[in-house]
């Protein structure tokens, strides 16, 4: 059962399935956990941000906010560093931080210590 939960958390972080399906499956597991089962890394966040930047639409921004809200509140997830945690928090709370726009996502992406691949910053 623990292995299935870890696989599901990986699916969530990598958005390997429709978010509504992942959310439904996550309901089988509590938010609270005694231990971290999966670590969200900068590369994971980079890949998610790039995919949303390249799909520049309101629907994708709403999905990104929902994704970040789910990730932010799970005790079975940990973060590689404070920077990753802070960016997830900002994505989950655009009213408190910055509206989710292509430009703001590019700014968040630039805060990561990873080369930007596959993002057309001039689009």
Image: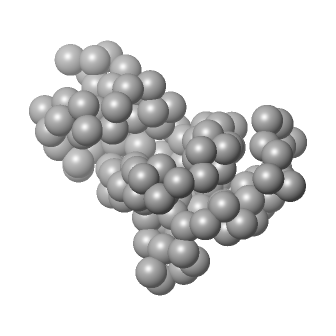
Looking at the image, residue 93 sits to the left or right of residue 50; the answer is left
From the top left corner, tell me how far across and down residue 48 is, in percent: 58, 42
> Which residue ends up furthest to the left in the rendered image?
28
Specify the quadrant of the image occupied by residue 76: top left
* Quarter of the rendering occupied by the N terminus: top left
From the top left corner, tell me how far across and down residue 38 is, in percent: 45, 34
**Residue drawn at (54%, 75%), measured in percent from left and top?**
99
Q: Nearer the viewer, residue 113 or 101?
A: 101
> Which residue ends up furthest to the bottom in the rendered image?
96
Residue 37 visible? The answer is no
In this rendering, the answer to whether 1 lies above or below 62 is: above
In this rendering, the answer to whether 40 lies above or below 122 is: above
From the top left corner, tell me how far across and down residue 65 is, in percent: 43, 59
Q: Nearer the viewer, residue 68 or 33?
A: 68
**Residue drawn at (42%, 53%), measured in percent from left and top?**
59
From the top left corner, tell me how far across and down residue 71 is, in percent: 40, 50
**Residue drawn at (48%, 74%), measured in percent from left and top?**
94
Count of marks placed on residues: 0
């Amino acid at each position: 059962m623990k292995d299935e939960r870890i696989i599901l958390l990986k699916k969530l972080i990598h958005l390997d399935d429709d978010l509504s399906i992942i959310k439904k499956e996550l309901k089988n597991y509590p938010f609270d956990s005694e231990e971290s089962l999966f670590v969200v890394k900068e590369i994971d966040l980079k890949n998610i941000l790039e995919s949303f930047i390249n799909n520049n639409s309101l629907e994708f921004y709403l999905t990104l906010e929902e994704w970040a809200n789910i990730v932010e509140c799970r005790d079975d997830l940990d973060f590689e560093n404070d920077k990753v945690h802070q960016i997830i928090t900002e994505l989950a709370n655009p009213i408190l931080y910055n509206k989710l726009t292509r430009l703001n996502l590019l700014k968040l992406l630039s805060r990561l210590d990873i080369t930007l691949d596959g993002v057309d910053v001039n689009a």
